Image (cartoon, rainbow, N blue to C red):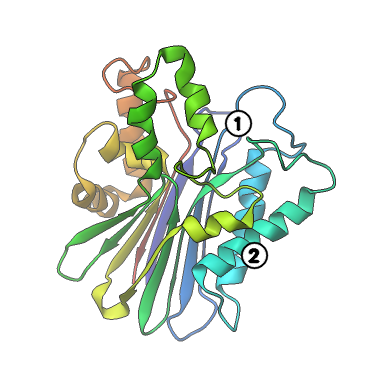
Amino acid sequence: MRIQSATAPGTPGQPNEDFAAVAMPTEAGEGALVVLDGVTAPRGDFGCAHGVAWFSARLGGTLLRALARTPAPTLREALAESISHTADAHRTTCDLSHRRTPQATVVCARWDAARVEHLVLSDSALLIEAPTGLVRPVLDARLDEVRPRARALPAGERAAFVESLRNAPGGFFTAAADPSVAAHAVVGATPREEVRTLAALTDGVGRWTETFGLGDWTALLAALRARGPEGVIDEVRAAESADPEGAAFPRGKAHDDATAVLLTL
C-alpha cells in the first residue's frame, strides 16, 4: 500500500481548515481514511470560541477512531456519532444553534479484504479507480444544484438564499452539530478487487477539474499519480494566481485550502 498526501492553506499564515488522516489498524489489509474541508465562516461572530480549524481536527480525529473501531459501525453511524461527540466537546461554551456554527464537508472510506466502503457529504470528492484504469467520481451534487438557483436571483440576495438552504430540506448538508445530517451522506461499497486507487480531495483540489478545467476526473487522478498531490496543488495555485479576481473562472474566493490524499491499495 502506498499513501501520498499534501495540504496547503488558501492564504499563507492563516489557519488551514482542512483535515486529513489515514489509519491501518490491523495487519490484515484493513484501514480507513478521512478528509474534511472546514467551511470558512463569514467575518463576525458565528457562535463558537474555538474556530473552524479546531472543529475540523476534532471531528476528523473522532471520525477516524470510530471507523477503526470493532465492532464496526456503518459509515453513517460513525459520522453521526462523531458529530455528536464533537458537539458535546463545546456545547457548554458555544452556540451550536447558530447557522454557521463550525462545520465541514466529509469524505471517508474504509476497506478490508472484501470491500471498500465510502461516504461523501457536501462538495469534497472521492475518486475510485478500478484495476482497468476506469475512474469513478463519488460526488454529493446538492450544493451544485443550489448554485444555479442562486444565480437566478439579484446579486444581493444570493448569499442569503444559499445560507437558507444550508442543512435544510431541499438544500445541501454539512457536518455541523446535528448528527441527523449523516443520513443525507452519499454512501456505497465496492468489492476490494475492483479498487486499485482512492483519491480523497477537498474542493480546493477539485478546482483543478471543476473550476479551471485542466482535465476531467481521470486526468486529475493521473496528475496526482504523476506529480503527486503537492504538484497538483501547485497547479491549482498557479491557475488561481493567473485569475486573481475570478473574471475568467468565477469562484467564491480567489484561493482555497487544498488537500489531497492518494492511496494505492
Q: Quadrant of the N terminus?
A: bottom left
Question: Secondary structure beneath disc 1?
Answer: loop
Look at label 1 and name its amino acid: Ala
Look at label 2 and name its amino acid: Glu
Tell me residue 18's x, y (percent). Answer: 53, 44
Q: Residue at x 62, y 69 (%)?
A: 65
Q: Residue furthest right?
A: 92
Q: Is residue 242 left or right of residue 58?
A: left
Tell me residue 183's x, y (percent). Answer: 51, 60
Q: Are marks 2 and 1 in contact (CB under 8 Å)?
A: no
Quadrant position of residue 230: top left
Q: Nearer the viewer, residue 147 or 264?
A: 147
Residue that numbered label 2 is attached to: 81
Q: Residue furthest left?
A: 132
172 up-or-down from 61: above or below = above
Residue that numbered label 1 is attached to: 41
